[in-house]
Image (tube, rainbow, N blue to C red):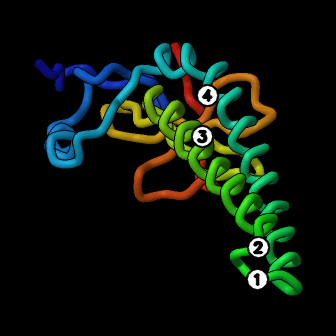
Amino acid sequence: MFNLDREPLFSGQPMLLEDLNEEDVQRLDIENLSVLSIDQVRETLPDVERQLSTLQAIVDEAHDMTEEIEILLESLPPEHPHVVEMSELLGGLVAHWQQTIAKIERHGARVAGLDPGRIEWYGVVDNHLMLYSWTCGESDIEWYYGLDESFSSRKPLIEA
């Protein structure tokens, strides 16, 4: 199933799942990760970017609503109809947030940060399991880093 003979032509070369090294294949079996090719990641980017924008708006609105509830609670009891209504609205925002995260995850992506917005996907680079990395303002998936590294250690993808 896996082609362990294929070596990368350049450091930073995106590869297919069958090019993954044996150690990382075992990690996949244990952690049940969704691993995508660079082409699959690029196909998902427009929708994931829209979902991330929605998520950022939800978080901003939830923050504002939480502050408003705190102010209301300074003068009203928790059971007051206006406090209850605001709390229910906040609960609806939390549900919307969860649904939006689920949509992002269905694309094999995960949210790495909200400000600025950052998204990651598991992929294979140089025969190893890595994270493809995208941040708001970038037009394409052009970066990756190792699972034990951080966003600040991103390296450029090199495509032949």
Of mark 3 and mark 2, the one earlier in the sequence is: 2
What kind of residue is marked 4?
Answer: Val
Answer whether labels 2 and 1 touch (C-beta < 8 Å). yes
Q: Which residue is mark 1?
A: 77
Q: Which mark is residue 119?
A: 3
The secondary structure type at the circle numbered 4 is: helix
Q: Which mark is residue 80?
A: 2
What kind of residue is marked 3?
Answer: Ile
Residue 51 higher or lower than 159, as above or below: below
138 vs 156, left or right, is right
What kind of residue is marked 1?
Answer: Pro
Which callout, 2 or 4, points to the residue nearer the camera? 2
Of mark 4 and mark 3, the one earlier in the sequence is: 4
Marks 4/3: CA–CA distance = 8 Å
Which callout, 3 or 1, points to the residue nearer the camera? 1
What kind of residue is marked 2?
Answer: His
Q: Crowdedness of circle 1 by 10 Å Cα count: few (<14), some, many (20+)?
A: few
